[in-house]
């Protein structure tokens, strides 16, 4: 039990002294998540949208979707007369 508490205190002191790293990770995640959610919504990929919305992968799933899945599809716009 002491090792868990010691590990927790070490982690806590790291977070407090390096808070800017976590803010960068939050901003990084939000940017990629926003692009991926926007693209999946436009392409009507409902299950990808749900997965991206729920899972927090620090941008890994979002980047995978944007560069490998989403780029194979496009939105077709038909003109109405």
Image (tube, rainbow, N blue to C red):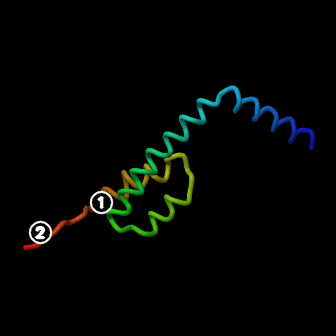
In whole angstroms, how far apart are the C-alphas of marks 1 and 2?
A: 23 Å
Horizontally, residue 20 falls left or right of residue 74, namely right
Residue 77, picture quadrant: bottom left
Q: Where is 31 relative to 16, above or below?
A: below
- Residue placed furthest toward the left: 81
Q: Badge 1, how many Cα within 10 Å: few under 14, some, many 20+?
A: few
Q: Which of 30 and 70 lies nearest the eye of the viewer?
A: 30
- Residue placed furthest toward the top: 17
Residue bearing mark 2? 79
Residue bearing mark 1? 72
Q: Are marks 1 and 2 in contact (CB under 8 Å)?
A: no
Residue plotted at (82% across, 34% down): 9
Secondary structure found at label 1: helix
Q: Position of residue 47 (x, y in %)?
A: 46, 69
Q: Position of residue 69 (x, y in %)?
A: 37, 59
Residue 21, picture quadrant: top right
Residue plotted at (12% across, 69% down): 79
- Residue placed furthest toward the front: 81
């Amino acid at each position: 039990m002491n090792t868990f508490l010691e590990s927790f205190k070490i982690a806590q002191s790291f977070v407090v002294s390096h808070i800017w790293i976590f803010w960068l990770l939050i901003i990084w995640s939000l940017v990629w998540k926003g692009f991926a959610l926007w693209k999946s919504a436009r392409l009507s990929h409902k299950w990808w949208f749900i997965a991206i919305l729920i899972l927090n992968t620090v941008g890994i799933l979002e980047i995978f979707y944007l560069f490998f899945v989403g780029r194979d599809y496009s939105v077709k716009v038909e003109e109405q007369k």
